[in-house]
Image (cartoon, rainbow, N blue to C red):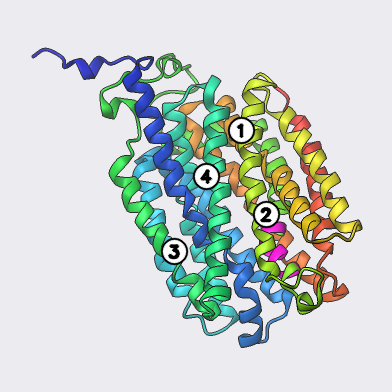
């Protein structure tokens, strides 16, 4: 029987270009709603504090729970993405996280909040690393900075989606905090179903040849590698751990902003502020907007300015993040100033996230990309989880939520210094 034309389609052709863009957009669309399942806690904190009489230190531990659950999930689920494919794994995460959020909405105290949020963190970890693996299967090394930049742009816009939908629930619809965990995630479930219908894990599943660089697999990166061997190869790679530490400090800064910035701007004295004409919660939307465009910019710089030398744009943005966080901490500002500096802080703090993930297949190859992404993301969320109770304790002790930005500045400096050690 003759081979159908589609079975020998080249990856350089117009059909392949359309297909790889379709796969990228499918992953982006699904991840656009993923954060509605894990970045809404900051807007629920005031209601949780009132109902359960919890301190900010206790809230910090609840926030740490999801981050550590996510860290454990990353260590396991990245390998699941390599084993079962990103399509099935990412779609399952979307549906299961939706169910976990609804379970959290029925919490009756600290323990149920902590356990439910931890479990949700584990299930959320079914998304990013498998999605990253799917992208690496379709996009070449020379284009991955752009592809991951767009992926992380979608992640940044997912934060915007989470912030806006949570604000609609509490400020527009005037519903209590439990509905923050019920309504926004319905869009995540729908996105997961559509992603499963559209996405395909590998070019060969649509009749294309694999990427050229995939056809020359080196002896230390074999096809059909056993899970145990994949793990061993990844954990023995020193640059994975150096990158994980740099990413860990960056993520500590990122989640310090995501969780505590709403608390800072929606504090008890917000009605007396100069911009009290609007709920300051809406000011915080500038933060994830900056994050989204920062990821897009850093990925582009990685490919087009720094020649795919990934550590340089990471270190550059971390240095600029230190300056921006110090400015917010030290200089009182008006409404316009708050919006502008929050945008820039998000832009520089989150921007390198896209470049970290473009780095992964450069370091370990396609076949281990999901596993290595999971290991590095484990570092990210272990560090971020350590930071949350720390910030809560600082705010409880000094009654000054602006200390968030001092912590962000210090952790960004440590991230930039660590990133310089990744050098190719």
In this rendering, the answer to whether 192 lies above or below 312 is below
Q: Residue at x 68, y 82 (%)?
A: 54
x and y percent of residue 205 in the render? 27, 29
Q: Which residue lies furthest to the front in this view?
A: 277
Which of label 1 and label 2 is nearer to you?
A: 2
x and y percent of residue 45 in the render? 64, 75
| Mark-to-mark CA distance, 2 and 4 | 15 Å
Q: Is residue 87 left or right of residue 283?
A: left
Mark 3 residue element: helix
What range is drawn magenta here?
257-264
Q: Which residue is drawn at 78% across and 38% down?
A: 416
Q: Of callouts 1 and 4, which one flags the residue occurring earlier in the amino acid sequence? A: 4
| Residue marked by disc 1 | 236
| Mark-to-mark CA distance, 3 and 2 | 22 Å
Which of label 1 and label 4 is nearer to you?
A: 4
Mark 4 residue element: helix
Q: In this view, does 290 lie to the left or right of 418?
A: left
Q: Of callouts 1 and 3, which one flags the residue occurring earlier in the amino acid sequence? A: 3
| Residue marked by disc 3 | 185
Q: Check if residue 262 falls in the magenta segment.
A: yes
| Mark-to-mark CA distance, 1 and 2 | 40 Å
């Amino acid at each position: 029987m003759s081979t159908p034309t589609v079975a020998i389609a080249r990856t350089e052709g117009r059909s392949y270009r359309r297909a790889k863009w379709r796969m990228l957009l499918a992953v982006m669309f699904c991840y656009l709603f993923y954060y509605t399942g894990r970045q809404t806690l900051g807007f629920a904190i005031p209601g949780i504090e009132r109902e359960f009489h919890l301190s900010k230190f206790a809230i910090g531990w609840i926030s740490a729970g999801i981050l550590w659950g996510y860290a454990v999930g990353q260590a396991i689920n990245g390998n699941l993405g390599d084993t079962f494919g990103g399509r099935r794994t990412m779609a399952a995460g979307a549906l299961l996280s939706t169910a976990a959020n609804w379970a959290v909405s029925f919490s009756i105290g600290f323990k149920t909040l902590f356990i439910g949020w931890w479990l949700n963190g584990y299930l959320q970890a079914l998304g990013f690393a498998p999605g990253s693996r799917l992208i690496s299967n379709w996009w070449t090394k020379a284009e991955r900075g752009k592809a991951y930049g767009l992926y992380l742009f979608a992640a940044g816009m997912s934060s915007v989606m989470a912030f806006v939908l949570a604000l609609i629930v509490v400020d527009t619809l005037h519903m209590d905090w439990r509905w923050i965990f019920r309504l926004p995630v319905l869009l995540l479930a729908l996105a997961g179903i559509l992603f499963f219908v559209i996405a395909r894990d590998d070019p060969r599943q649509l009749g294309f040849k694999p990427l050229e660089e995939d056809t020359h697999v080196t002896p230390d990166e074999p096809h059909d590698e056993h899970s145990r061997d994949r793990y061993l190869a990844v954990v023995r790679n020193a640059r994975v751990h150096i990158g994980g530490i740099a990413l860990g400090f960056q993520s500590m800064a990122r989640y310090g902003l995501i969780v505590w910035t709403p608390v800072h701007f929606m504090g008890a004295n917000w009605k007396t502020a100069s911009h009290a004409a609007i709920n300051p919660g809406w000011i915080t939307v500038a933060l994830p907007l900056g994050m989204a465009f920062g990821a897009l910019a850093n990925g582009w710089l990685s490919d087009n300015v720094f020649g795919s030398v990934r550590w340089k744009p990471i270190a550059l943005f971390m240095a600029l993040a230190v300056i921006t966080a110090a400015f917010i901490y030290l200089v009182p500002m008006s409404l316009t100033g708050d919006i502008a500096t929050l945008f820039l802080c998000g832009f520089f703090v989150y921007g390198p996230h896209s470049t970290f993930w473009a780095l992964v297949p450069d370091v370990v190859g396609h076949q281990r990309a999901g596993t290595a992404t999971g290991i590095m993301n484990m570092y990210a969320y272990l560090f971020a989880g350590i930071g949350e109770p720390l910030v809560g304790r600082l705010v409880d002790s000094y009654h000054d939520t602006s200390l968030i930005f001092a912590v962000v500045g210090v952790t960004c400096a440590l991230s930039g210094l660590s990133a310089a050690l990744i050098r190719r």
